[in-house]
Amino acid sequence: MNGTKLIILGRDGILNRFREDHVKEPAEWEPIPGALEAVAELNQAGWHVVLATNQAGIGRGLVDMAAFNAVHVHMMKCLAEHGGRLDAVFFCPHAPEDACDCRKPLPGMMHDIARRYGVPLAQVPMVADTLRDLQTAQAAGCTPHLVLSGRARALEPHEVSAWVAAVPGTVVHHDLAAFARHLLLKPTAKEL
């Protein structure tokens, strides 16, 4: 069995503030307080963290690949300043109407990640801020975690409960920092 400890994160609403108009340049990528430090803590505890993000702005011509790459160079620099890193960025550049198999909520991107890392997805937590991404985690067989720092922030408690009911096994956290504390304080099978 592969011993790689892997976490899959969404980007917008989890690492950085969600923007309805897409993050089109580095200056628009604004980290959520505590998120970069959370990634660093996870890395220091031996976790590999990868990003899985839908980027329909590319498919719609709102963001070009040079701008997308510049945003991620900036993101990686910000993470490094806090002692963190992402091992890889997986993204779907397609618009919803393109009917690809990599756009969440379909699990194609997660399957690509599993193949790349040789890790069974049942061992992989996936952090989401939308019902669509929770459904992706469920479809891929990942453990779903919802953070209330992005689009889910506006939900009423009964709406959060409805999402959790729609995707059984979902664990809810205030933000990525709370998720990291949950994961790092959870005893492993060896410690039990």
Image (cartoon, rainbow, N blue to C red):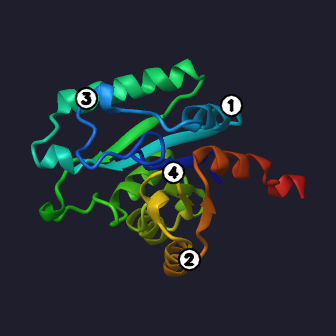
Mark 4, residues whose alpha carbon is within 10 Å: few (<14), some, or many (≥20)?
Answer: many
Q: Which residue is mark 4?
A: 149
Specify the amino acid type for callout 2: Ser
Q: Residues within 10 Å of mark 2 (few under 14, many from 20)?
A: some
At label 4, the amino acid type is Ser
Left-right relation of 61 to 93: left
Q: Which residue is mark 2?
A: 161
Image x and y of residue 164, in percent: 55, 75
Mark 1 Cα within 10 Å, few/some/many (few <14, many 20+)?
A: few
Q: Secondary structure at mark 3?
A: loop
Q: Pointer 1: what residue?
A: 44
Residue lying at the far right of the rendered structure: 192
Instruction: Indicate which label's residue lies in the foreground, 1 or 3.
Output: 3
Q: Residue at x 27, y 50 (%)?
A: 20
* 19 with respect to 124 (left or right): left
In the picture, the quarter occupied by the C terminus is: bottom right
Q: Earlier in the sequence, mark 4 or mark 3?
A: 3
**Which of pointers 4 and 1 indicates the residue nearer the eye?**
4
* Label 1 with label 3: CB-CB less than 8 Å: no
Viewer can see residue 3: no
What's the amino acid at mark 3? Answer: Glu
Q: Would you say residue 31 is visible in this rendering?
A: yes
Question: In this figure, which residue is indicated by the disc labeled 3?
Answer: 25
Query: Which of the two residues, 20 or 82, is positioned nearer the viewer here?
Result: 20
Find numbered disc 4 in the image and state the secondary structure of the residue it sits on.
loop
